[in-house]
Amino acid sequence: MIKKLFTLIVLTIIFSISTGFAQMQESRLELDFGTSYKLQKYSQTLNPDADKNLEPVYGLNGNAAHENIKEYVKSFEKSVKEPVYTFTIGADGGK
């Protein structure tokens, strides 16, 4: 009985130690963590050297751009239409 208990304790200790050492190694997931995010961010950059270009940017002036943005946002608002009520006297509903 004591021999079985001793064997069980030794096996438990060996299993615990081996499990602990197995977790000390970095997994492939941990090594590649964030790589896909960095690749996606880099591939979506149109011009990686844009910070070196000191030329002014040409396009819409501030007021025109502001008005365009206001119209764009306004286009998504739903307009509430007034209900139309019709009341006819002496009509049989078109039958």
Image (cartoon, rainbow, N blue to C red):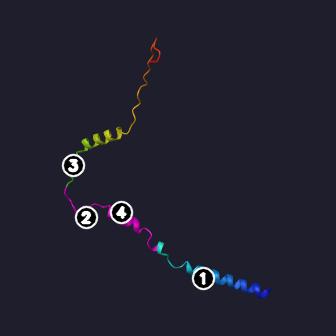
The reply, left or right, for residue 47 in relation to residue 12 is: left
The numbered disc on residue 41 is 4
| Residue 45 shown in magenta | yes
Q: Quadrant of residue 40?
A: bottom left
Q: List the single residue furthest toward the right.
A: 1
Question: Considering the image in quadrants, where does the N terminus appear?
Answer: bottom right
User: Which comes before the other along the chain, label 1 or label 4?
Assistant: 1
The Cα atoms of the two marked residues, 2 and 3, are separated by 20 Å
Between disc 2 and disc 1, the foreground one is 1
Q: Position of residue 3 (x, y in %)?
A: 77, 88
Q: Which residues are magenta?
A: 30-55
Circle 3: residue type: Gly
Instruction: Tell me which numbered mark, 2 or 3, is placed earlier along the sequence.
Output: 2
> Counting residues from the N terminus, which is met first, the one under dot 3 or under dot 4?
4
> Which residue is denoted by mark 3 in the rendering?
59
**As displayed, is residue 49 above or below residue 1?**
above
C-alpha separation, residue under disc 2 versus residue under disc 1: 50 Å
Position in image of residue 83 (x %, y %): 43, 25
Q: Which mark is residue 57?
A: none
Residue wearing tag 2? 49
Q: CA distance from mark 1 to mark 4?
A: 40 Å
Residue 70's x, y, as percent? 32, 40
Q: Alpha carbon of mark 3 to alpha carbon of mark 4: how far?
A: 25 Å
**Amino acid type, label 2:** Asp
The amino acid sitting under disc 1 is Ser
Could you say whether the residue bearing mark 2 is in a helix, strand or loop?
A: loop
